[in-house]
Every structure is written in structure tokens, then in C-alpha cells.
Image: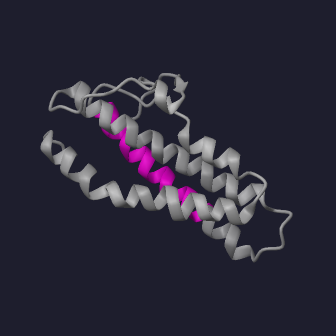
Amino acid sequence: MRSKKPLQRAILLPRGLPRRRITQSAPGQIALLHAIAHIELNAVDLALNMARRFTKTQLLVDFYHDWLGGADDEAQHFLMLSDRLADLGAAYGDLPAHDGLWQAADATKHDLLARLAIAPLVLEARGLDVTPTIIDRLKSVGDE
């Protein structure tokens, strides 16, 4: 069940984010799940930004549909994480997060090729690289 309280998130520079300890306790699980939820919500925003930002560029309509489909996928991931956070008595926005993904998006906002190189080929790829580790961390704290 999703939280009904209003979203209140503190966005910090990546280096300003407090170090979190991932433990078997609820706060430790919440810290990890909150961090993943933040990444998923940013992925929604980035996908929607791609579908809107470069509309003056003559691209196939499938380009835009693919990004909108990606946004939908990422939204489903975010909602699943939100539900899990609610199971633990927390909600997205309870902890501060960083704006590192948006720093990359802002740096490439006027260059489609640079954005395509950064968003899917670097940011998303990095996320896929750490997925097995994240799965192991969740299992290690008793969260299947």
C-alpha cells in the first residue's frame, strides 16, 4: 500500500549525501530501497525528458515511443519499491538523495548524441552492472 503523505525529498550534491549503512534492520533496508527508488524515479524523469527535449530534431516516432515505454517500465519499478518501502513503514522522500543523474542530464541538455551516450550507455549500463550486487545485498539483509 502506497503512502498517502506528501512527497518531501531533500536533494543534495552527491558528495553531501550522508553515508548509509545497509543492515538487516528496517532502517538499513529502507536506506538501500530508498536509494534504488530514487534511481528509478530519476530514470522516469530522464526518459520523459528524452521524449520531450529533442522534439525539434527529426527523429522517427519510434524513438519517442521507446522512451515513453521506458518511462512506463521505470515507473513500475519505482511503484514496486514504493510499495516495499511502505511495507517497512517508510516512503520515498523520507531520506535525502543526490542529484548526480540530473547533473549529467543538465550537462547534455542541448546535445542529443551526448545525452544518448550518457543516459543509456553510461548511467543505465552502470546500474545494470551493479544489479547483481544489489540483489546480493538485499538478500544478505533478509529481503527477497
Mark yes or no: residue 7 visible. no
Residue at 25% over, 53% down: 133
Q: Is the magenta stretch mostly helix, strand or loop?
A: helix
From what the image shows, is residue 122 above or below residue 94? below
Task: Estimate the x, y position of residue 132 in percent, counting from the top left.
Answer: 26, 58
Which residue in the rendered view is the most extreme toward the right?
56
Q: Which residue is drawn at 47% across and 29% down?
A: 15
64 on left or right of 94? right
Q: Does the magenta stretch include residue 73?
A: yes
Residue at 45% over, 62% down: 125
**Residue 36, x across and y down, in percent:** 39, 43
Residues 46 and 82: in front is 46
- Residue 114 in view (yes/no): yes
Q: In this view, does 30 lie above or below 58?
A: above
Point out the image quarter for the N terminus: top left
Q: Where is residue 58 in the image (x, y as percent from the top left)?
A: 84, 73
Does residue 127 sit above or below 56 in this rendering?
above
Drawn side of residue 15 relative to residue 1, left or right: right
Examine the rendered structure and indicate whether residue 48 appears above or below residue 12: below
Image: magenta residue range = 68-87
Q: Quick check: 65 left or right of 75?
A: right
**Residue 40 part of the magenta segment:** no
- Name the image colouring: one colour
Identify the image quadrant of residue 24: top left
